[in-house]
Image: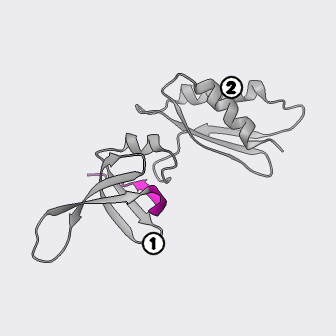
Amino acid sequence: MINKETVKELVNDFIAEKEIFLVDVKVSTTNRITVHVNKPSGITIDECAMISRHIETNLDRNREDYELNVSSPGLNMPFRVREQFEMSIGRQVEIIDNQGKKTRGVLMKVEDEGIEIESENNTKGKKNDTEEISFNFNEIKTVKEVISFK
């Protein structure tokens, strides 16, 4: 079976000193390798292809067969790394905390320990009030960007 750490090393070796960052690597028991990468301006298909070629060049198909997929993480996937949070500053996000409570708001800040959002306060009698809410990373189960087609 192909080692996940080996694939991570290969990706990190290729993306060193580039704007590209590694989001996640998964290797299934059947050697299906999934690599998610991105960059602040958005990863291109050509960049994904170059990373794929770099990985393929350094893995030996004669020793182990594998399936490789290199892509961006996709709009519906939760954030995994700090860079994803930073890319989404000013955008609407949905946070599910460890207790299962959902909170929506605009991501305002990313700090070492957590994030801050600005959320609409929907209490009666208050129209369009907003409040700032801080979350420590250890309090968060998932964060996803909210996609709007307005």
Name which residue lies at 21% across and 63% down. 120
**Residue type, numbered disc 2:** Arg
Q: Is residue 8 left or right of residue 47?
A: right
Q: Which residue corresponds to mark 2? A: 53
Q: Is residue 84 magenta?
A: no
Secondary element type, mark 2: helix
Q: Residue furthest right?
A: 63
Identify whether 147 is placed above or below 12. Answer: below
Q: Left or right: where does residue 8 sit relative to residue 21?
A: right
The span shown in magenta is 137-150
Residue 124 rendering spot, x and y as whole percentages? 14, 77
Q: CA distance from mark 2 to mark 1?
A: 40 Å
Given residues 111 and 147, the one toward you in this image is: 111
The one of 16 and 150 positioned closer to us in this rendering:
16
Give how far across and how far down residue 77 sits, in percent. 50, 52
> How far across and how far down the image is residue 135, in percent?
37, 59
- 143 falls in the magenta region: yes
Is residue 132 something that shows in the picture?
yes
Amino acid at the residue labelled 1: Gly
Q: Quadrant of the N terminus?
A: top right
Residue on which disc 1 sits: 100
| Horizontal side, residue 150 vs residue 21: left or right | left
